[in-house]
Amino acid sequence: MPYIDTSKLAAPSNGVGTFNVAATTEVAPAGEGAFRTTCTVSKMSFDDPIVFPGQAGKSHLHTFFGNTGVNADSTPESLRTSGNSTCRGGIANRSAYWVPTMIDTKDGTPIVPDSIGVYYKMSLMGAAATNPIPTGLRMIAGDPNASAPHPDVFSMRFKCIGGPNNSNDQYGSVIPNCDVGATMWSEIFFPTCWDGVNLDSPDHKSHMSYGVLVPDPTSTQGWFMRVCPATHPVPIPSITFNVAYVVKELNAPKRWRLSSDNYDPSLPGGYSSHADWFNGWDATISNTWAKNCIQNLKDCHSHLLGDGRMMF
């Protein structure tokens, strides 16, 4: 794993402790069935309340967003009822979102992302079939032990956005050398099919599943479609993390590696990309955007709830 200068960890954020939901006259337009939210960094720490519950300092370094009180001892109840938030909506969204910290191997400096955008969209089974997120659900996407390209580049991927040489840049499995001023975008897709019973599992993945390919019965061209498997029949919103790092120095991304990149340093960084999501939403709010934005096929942008209210 890369050397980390712990004296340079990002200072913890105080977040906000207010329920930031208000009335609005803005109407959500028709869309694909989507709600989004944005958050800033809440802290960096060597905790992982999903993989190493109750074991402070056990994990590789993580960058956290959302609930400011998250630590190794966090539980579904503690997240829902305590801690401030660095997300839009304040404590209406006390969820915890975390990823391995990006490290500049020149001197071990942990890199602070500029933001995270979290997308909640209709499931692969369609808008009407998408269920609200279960209270207490947590899950992991990706493999922190990976040392080779992910078999599905549409699950974990990187891309340059902006910059004079990045306009045609493609998604890939490793950290790209983006131009100065461009944004290096790390994208992680979570599974969208739940087993309907377990809020977690021993490997923190088995209670969830990605869709499986089956023949599309409506296609005359032999196309396939993705559906939830019989073992995981409950579709929930498709959750995607989009973590943004603005490049400030020429060729700096060539030195970047994830804190979990525990493999030959001569290989490109980024293979171990993964993310953790721990539900801490106020259920009345998450149920509202699930119904009004996703099930009703609206585009609620990053603030609308679809019922005459907005998050700020």
Image (cartoon, rainbow, N blue to C red):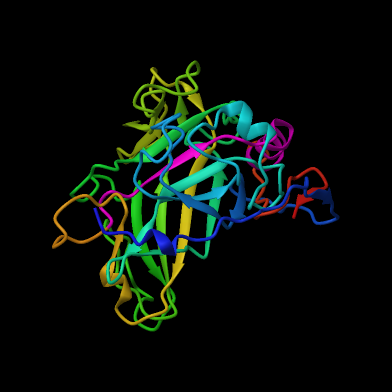
Q: Compared with residue 73, is residue 249 higher up or lower down, i.e. above or below?
A: below
Q: Residue furthest top?
A: 197
User: Residue 290's x, y, as percent?
Assistant: 65, 36
**Side of 180 where 263 appears, left or right:** left
State yes or no: residue 280 in magenta. Answer: yes
Q: Quadrant of residue 8?
A: bottom left
**158 is higher (above) or lower (below) than 307:** below
Q: Could you tell whether 274 is left or right of 291 in the image?
A: left
Give the magenta part as a residue range: 270-294
Whole-percent x, y for residue 129 in the image: 57, 28
Of 21 and 153, nearer the camera is: 21
Q: Is residue 43 magenta?
A: no
Image location of residue 226, percent across then percent down: 38, 34
Q: In the rendered picture of this protein, how many numbered marks are placed on residues?
A: 0
In this rendered view, identify the residue nearer to me: 164 or 266: 266
Q: Is residue 101 above or below residue 125?
A: below
Residue 210 location, x and y as percent?
A: 38, 33
Q: Residue at position x 40%, y 22% from top?
A: 201
**Residue nearest the observer in this picture, 171 or 96:** 96
Q: Tell me the quarter of the image containing the C terminus.
A: bottom right
Q: Give residue 14's quadrant in the image.
A: bottom right
Residue that appears at 39% across and 55% down: 101
